[in-house]
Image: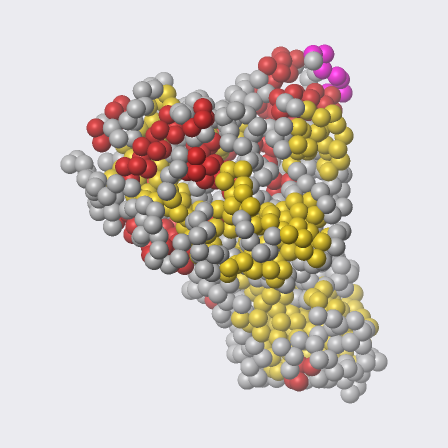
Amino acid sequence: MVSVMGYADRRSVRVGERIQFKVSVDGSPSYKATIVRLISPQSFPQPHAPDFKFETMACPVNGEHKGQHHEIPAGSYAEIPAHPKLSRLTSCTLVASIWPTLPGSGEQAILGTVDGSGGLGLHLDKEGRLALVVGGQHFVLPRKLRPRRWSFVAASLDAEAGVAILYAREAELYQFDTLGAASKRFTRVPTPAPSERPFRIAAAHDGPKAIRHFNGKIERPRVLGRALSLNDLDRLAPAGPTGPAHVDAIADWDFSRDISSEIVSDVSHNGLWGRTINLPTRAVASSNWNAERHDWRAVPEQYGAIHFHDDDIYDALWPTAFEVTIPDGWKSTTYALRLEAGDSEFWVPFFVRPKQGEAKARCAFLVPTCTYAAYSNFRSRVEGRWSELYHGRVTVLDRTDFLMEEYPDLGSSTYDPHRDGSLTLYSSMMRPVTNFRPTGRVYKFCQDMFFIAWLEHQKIDYEIVTDDDLHYEGVAAISDYACIFTGSHPEYYSTEMLDAVESFLRRGGRFMYLGGNGFYWRTAYHATLPGVVEVRRAGQGFLASDVERESNMSFTGEIAGTWHRVGRPPQLICGVGMVTQGFDACTGYKRTKESHDPRAAFIFKDVKEEIVGDFGVLMGGAAGYEIDRHDVSLGSPRHSLRLASSWNHTNVYDISVPSFTDLVPKPNEDAPDPVRADIVFFETPGGGAVFSVGSIAWSGSLSWNNYDNNIERITRNVLMRFIDPKPFQMPVSA
Amino acid sequence: MRDREGNLTIKIDPKWIDLAQEFRNKPFGGHTPALQELLALMRTAPIEGRYFLWLSKPHTEWTLAKMSDTRPLKPIQVGPTFTSLEEAEWHVFKLRWEQMTGQKLPIN
């Protein structure tokens, strides 16, 4: 079967800038590449939905290309460049504390230079027993290491005598059933041959490739320059991971340093620094964590472990197949590289912005690339047991969805467990992403294409800004525009992004939140690595078990979790916040008395109906999928107007309520149902304003009746007023 | 209820035809609590071997498929092919009913 896949080095590119594409084709010597402008998504073939529409751009890269298959080098480890002090080890001791998660599932390297029959290393053998690997031989301590238990492990090698000692001892902190020290002495151990390979922690070599990845945590790995005796090891084992460099250290890597970076710091005097590959998880509790703090910045010495996974992937590192410099004249909108080979098709969307300082439109579509990254390769939709329950219907999947099964090294999203059961915290776009496309499930990017289809159909002048731009450039990314509008699901927000939107509003900007479950999870971008985000699910333990004690971001140190948990609920910025989810059916909204307030007159101009959005190509209504409601007690501005509310959501929506909120049942017949989406409007002190719809499904109603409907009218009414420079006035009562 | 391995811990009574009829009339949308509980059981079986719909033509044609019994999961198209999601949903309901009760549903 032929499979073609690709990715780009960036999502956002200005006119005049360059974007590089990486392509792999499996089962075919060539593939076809076409750069297209995307106009509308592949959605439901019904009269009210736009047809799938894209047009080919004139571009020299269009056409057949010779291709080849590239592997995805999944699996994280740390690497220290080859150095004589590490490559010519003779008598020495290899030391670390480890917390293995999958002992017994294949051989796993803890540290060393093992490459085939060469090198020297401390490994777990395929049975989960500690092994000294030298000269292609394994010297094995008979005890199996237990999963998720900290053990001090060491291999001491006296090369002159040909004697080695293997040693393991479980840490005792908070455990009553720890296993004491076990050791074994070996004779006739060969002297290790010099190795020119880099020194690796958590992987061995197969030529340049990394293999035998370790699953679990490692802390304070060290190479000591002499063979420690059994007495030495008995003294060192309970000493813990803190303290200065060992007096005999050739290298002594302290992972409690430089936690936010890829740097692996050597605290010995030799300066044998290295870096992590494929973003293993940092800022994780180490063996001495004492239950006093959750913030690794306060007690870095208790977060001096790194959790490695054999399915970590940051960058597939494929060579650039071709690059495109965006020519003058290309409109700021959505584009994609379309790849075809045999019956396989793959899309690599990207977004073009105007040149710096040349923005012309009054409004911009803020494309939620941060959310796309958090969801990239959302494996649980295929493999997860609960997906069908939450969606209230049998799961629909296609060939592209199954690429994650055909090529497991494509990795996971922040919703998915690693192979060892720990939750994925980092999610990258520097790899093929199966759910970032204008086809397949009409959700996320595919659904956001409804906005582009609407803008194009109505000939509204707009430009594009992405979350990535907002994060890196702050308010400057959007300050050329009078109005910014979001996509259908801007769920993931970094502090920088949220600050930029707030700053924009304070200086008179207008903001349309045209989705649901927005501004929900605090998200962190890496300081130096592009295209990757971090999410930690603190406060929602239903996704993972160890979220609380590791509840600060490794990338930034910030408190992690929902913005509500952090203390900055979404209601503050947009007047509404997440209630629940359900994907089986959508409803409309009933207007409230407040919708007839003169302040809202512009919104409902030419809208006669009291019920709006009771139609739509997404399950029959504008209100649904994931829904938000107005709540002054959680931060909705007191002067905000609740203009309309949905009602009568199905009981699939009730299933998720306990996961997100502790809603009480509807108190009386006249009170609004707490399971509802609200449309909200409010003004801001600087002459700006906010309009929120509190529903992911909103965009699916725009095209109804050939774009002649009350949802389209409301959206356009708001947009037209929001690009009008006339300032909004705060109401007297506010 | 299901246990940790996904096995049913309660017996589905084949006499609950009224729930099947309710689902037949309205596969998507609000359901009675009893039907919702039954659907929750049907929709939370282990993923290995579970039915799903293979999108055989974009948003117009769906083929009944099963996940392989082992991971990595492979799609096994078993048919039939549907042009209506409601019909596909009802077909899967009938198959699961038979799996859970040991009896065919007496309604079409």
The image quarter in which residue B1 lies: top right
Residue A491 shown left or right of residue A249 in the figure: left
Residue A288 shown left or right of residue A358 in the figure: right
Query: For this rendering, which residue is in front, B44 or B86?
Result: B86
Q: What type of secondary structure mainly makes up the magenta span?
A: loop
The vertical placement of A375 against B64, above or below, is: below
The image quarter in which residue B90 lies: top right
Locate residue A164, reporting x and y percent: 76, 78
**Residue A583 drawn in magenta:** no
Locate residue A61, reporting x and y percent: 60, 56
Question: Which region shows up in magenta?
Answer: B100-107
- Where is the C terminus of chain A found, in terms of image quarters? top left
Residue A44 shown left or right of residue A356 in the figure: right
At 31% from the left edge and 35% from the top edge, which residue is drawn? A718
The vertical placement of A288 against A48, above or below, is: below
Residue A206 in view (yes/no): yes
Residue A154 shown left or right of residue A581 in the figure: right
Locate residue B61, reporting x and y percent: 66, 28
The vertical placement of A515 against A224, above or below, is: above
**Residue B102 drawn in magenta:** yes
At 56% from the left edge and 60% from the top edge, which residue is drawn? A323
At 68% from the left edge and 41% from the top edge, which residue is drawn? A399
Residue reaching furthest to the right: A188
